[in-house]
Image: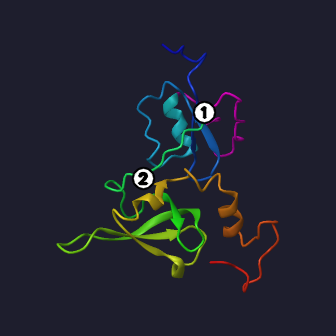
Amino acid sequence: AEALPARPPSRWVACDLCDKWRMVPWTAIDFDETKAFTCEDQRAWGVSAEEASCETPEPTWGEDDVVVKISTLDTDEAGVGTKCDALCVKTNVWFEAKIVDEKAPDANASRKLRIHFAKWGAKYDEWFDLPNDAYRLAPHRTYSAANETAQRAAKGLDRDGKKLNKRRRRR
């Protein structure tokens, strides 16, 4: 049998208001990473009111912290208003996104979700056909938060960090 680690691996969640990452204590067994989270929610874990604030600096990552990738979004539970990460077919880049509309399936059609990519105009929204496009959806900040290409593109920057002019912008 394998030996247990010296301490349990850390789990992290990002605040929906300030985007700062917070460590979920190993004692928060029932914490659901798929639900909305704000820094103030840390009070349920025993964090003081002063520390459970968006004003508190983001903690540093430890060398032994484990980042767990969640590969797919539970599309059965996802609906209008759900934040997620979505893979854009035009750029092949993961972006932070939100489900803004839904078409229920009928006898001849599958369920469809209209995805709005954060920081992009509505004209770039895409309809995802489920279950065919489910692979293009992931839980919020699974890929987009660590995706430097997506962050640069959303800011209108090229890979060298230079501002793209409107004709060179890819989306």
Look at the numbered disc 1 and give the secondary structure of its residue. loop
Residue sticking out furthest to the left:
107
Q: Which residue appears at 49% of the width and 45% of the height? A: 70
* Residue on which the image places disc 1: 66
Image quadrant holding the C terminus, namely bottom right
Q: Nearer the viewer, residue 16 or 120?
A: 120
- In the rendered image of this protein, does residue 23 appear above or below residue 155? above
Q: Residue at x 59, y 38 (%)?
A: 67
Image x and y of residue 103, in percent: 30, 72
Q: Can residue 53 be seen at all in this image of the molecule?
A: no
Q: Residues within 10 Å of mark 1 (few under 14, many from 20)?
A: few
Depicted 97 relative to depicted 57: above or below: below
Residue extending farthest bottom: 167
Q: Amino acid at mark 2?
A: Leu
Main SS class of the magenta portion in the image: loop
Which range of residues does the magenta coloring cover? 46-65
C-alpha span from label 2 to label 1: 20 Å
The residue under label 2 is 73
Q: Is residue 38 magenta?
A: no
Q: Amino acid at mark 1?
A: Val
Identify the residue shown where x is 72% and y is 65%: 152
